[in-house]
Image (tube, grey):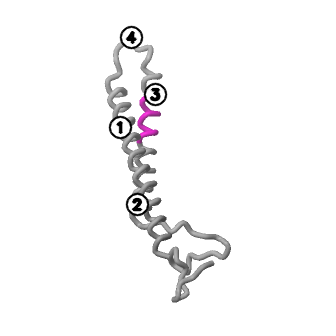
Amino acid sequence: MDTSEHGTPPSGDPALATSGVERVGWSASVVALHVVATVLLAVGFVAVAVTLWALFVSVDDGGGANIGAGILGVFGLGVGALGLVVLAAAGSAAAVTRVRRRRAH
């Protein structure tokens, strides 16, 4: 593993270094964006799944519209789309970070 002049791996804490395994070396902002995107996608997926379940359960209730399920579905799709946008931002931030680190060395 490549080390700097202080004996620290270039990707972070020496205690976390494992021989033969190279860490990605994401910045804290990229990790935060990735976590937020994952949470948003999970919430969106669960909301859409609950919407589909609610619509399935109430399909034979006499032809009435299930407004709550519809609103939850729109919310779930919006949150899921926002999660995809944040995930794209995390990917572009990771690419920029990688390019900057390569140019610095």
What amino acid does circle 4 point to?
Answer: Gly
Discs 4/3, front: 3
Nearest to the observer: residue 7 or residue 50: 7
First of labels 2, 1 by sequence position? 2
Under circle 1, the secondary element is helix
Disc sitting over residue 78 in the figure: 1
Q: Is residue 42 left or right of residue 17?
A: left
Which residue is found at the position 46% from the left and 22% from the top?
A: 57
| Gap between marks 2 and 4 measured at Cα | 47 Å
Q: Which residue is mark 3?
A: 52
Task: Identify residue for label 2.
Answer: 32
Extent of the magenta region: 44-52
Q: Residue at x 46, y 74 (%)?
A: 104
Q: Position of residue 62 (x, y in %)?
A: 39, 10
Where disc 2 sits, the SS reads helix
Of the two numbered discs 2 and 4 in the rendering, the one whose residue sits closer to the viewer: 2
Percent x, y for residue 71? 32, 29
Give residue 20's mark: none
Type of secondary structure dominating the magenta stretch:
helix
Task: Name which residue lies at 38% across and 31% down.
Answer: 73
Contact (Cβ within 8 Å) of mark 1 with mark 4: no
Mark 1 / mark 4, whichever is N-terminal: 4
Looking at the picture, which amino acid does disc 2 mark?
Answer: Ala
Between the C-alphas of marks 1 and 4, the distance is: 29 Å
Mark 4 or mark 3, earlier in chain: 3
Q: Nearer the viewer, mark 1 or mark 4?
A: 1
**Amino acid marked by disc 1:** Gly
Q: Considering only order in the chain, which callout, 4 or 2, is on the residue closer to the N terminus? A: 2
